Image (spheres, rainbow, N blue to C red):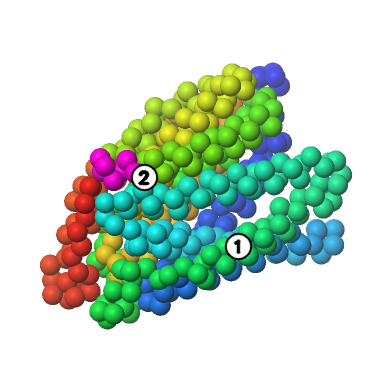
Amino acid sequence: MESSSSRPEPTPLVGTLGAFVGFAVGFAARPVGGILFGHIGDRVSRKAALVMTLSIMGIATFLMGVLPTYQQVGIWAPTLLVVLRVLQGIAAGGEWGGGVLIISENSSDERRGLFSAFSQGGVTLGFVLASAAFYLAQTLPDEQFMAWGWRLPFLLSILLFGVGMYIRFRLPETKEFEQVKSDGDTAALPVWAALRTHPKEILVAMGLRVAENGGSYLLLSFSLVYGVHVGVDRGTLLLGVMLSMLFAFCTIVFFGHLSDKIGRRKVYALGATALAVMAFPFFWLLDSNSPGLIVLAYFIGNGICHAAMIGSQPAFFHELFSPEVRYSGMALGHEIAAVFAGGLAPFIATALLLTYNSSTPVAIYAIGLAAITLIALAFSRNVGQKRPSTPDAQRAVPEIKVARR
């Protein structure tokens, strides 16, 4: 029989598995949001879809800060939390495509990668703000943090909600969508039209998403669990994550710009390959328990591996779909894959760690995610460039030009 010292301490990891189940619930709702707001974005307005998704996200996040406790309302407490997570998932599923298209459809072909990358760079800054808010809340005495301190970041999110609404109401509609509406080319059922005329593009988008989304949650959410498991100070881990995300803001924009110069596929392949190469060294650097090496791991993982993919992704996805079904097509590819990639990645990784007490199977899992994306890249060479040749399909989906593939 193995000694207790040779086996992982099960209780914390089992609790983490349960937390990641709740985390996955939100991801399961994302395709619903993608379909719903993809329809609105392709039929009514990109801007209207964005305002609606931010409203749902802002209200759900704020309400998390005023949830009653289990001692107050019993089973209703976790039930209400799941409902709010589902609403957040629906909003997130509909928001990504609209946020990207507001920028990419107002950008020139020559600088689409650069400008649309800012939509992803903004996510990193939001992550830093959220991490900083929780870090400050945790400086409270444990009793106060558990009683009310944890609510503060959720309640303060109302300020960001107000700023976001102000900006979105002032945004113009995209030029390409206005052209689609003026030409009378909007599809009656955009999601169905996207599935019928762009099936390969949707599958390619899903494959591209696997390493980017799954890898990001290994490098962020799971890495914190793993670091604590091997004895790294939580503050060191959070510092590494926050500094790397600030660095990633710059590199995401750089890789978006680079995709304008050398092509989306090459930059994306760089990121997926780097993730595979870095899979084992990333965890070795965390094992070192050296603050400098841990920060280096996060800089390479988040600032290069993930940044190369997410920086080139918005323009890449934009160019896979024609404008009248672009919101729906992007949402389907992006959000369906998110359920199986980002939604399950931290759960699977934690289960592997709990079973084997080693980072080796997790690193192999990351390499598998990268391999799926590289296969999708191989099939992406000819997608998004030619539209179906039947008369009905030509009327529904006009040919588009794609540069720098």
| Residue appearing at x 47%, y 23% in the figure | 281
**Alpha-carbon span between mark 1 and mark 2:** 26 Å
| Residue appearing at x 59%, y 38% in the figure | 242
Q: In this rendering, would 261 be left or right of 19?
A: left
Let me know if residue 164 is in the magenta part.
Answer: no
Residue 75 x %, y %: 76, 62
Q: What residue type is labelled 1?
A: Val
Res 399 quadrant in image: bottom left
Residue 91 visible, this orientation: yes
Callout in the foreground (1, 2): 1
Q: What residue type is labelled 2?
A: Gly
Residue 190 x %, y %: 34, 72
Camera-nearest residue between 287 and 104: 104
Which quadrant is home to the N terminus?
top right
What's the magenta region? 257-263
Camera-nearest residue between 33 and 59: 59
| Residue appearing at x 57%, y 25% in the figure | 294
The residue beneath circle 2 is: 256
| Residue appearing at x 45%, y 60% in the figure | 99
Q: In this rendering, would 212 be left or right of 74?
A: left
The residue beneath circle 1 is: 163
Residue 31 x %, y %: 46, 62
Q: Is residue 400 above or below residue 228?
A: below
Camera-nearest residue between 269 and 296: 296
Label 2: how many Cα within 10 Å (few below 14, some 14–19, many 20+): many
Camera-nearest residue between 6 and 80: 80
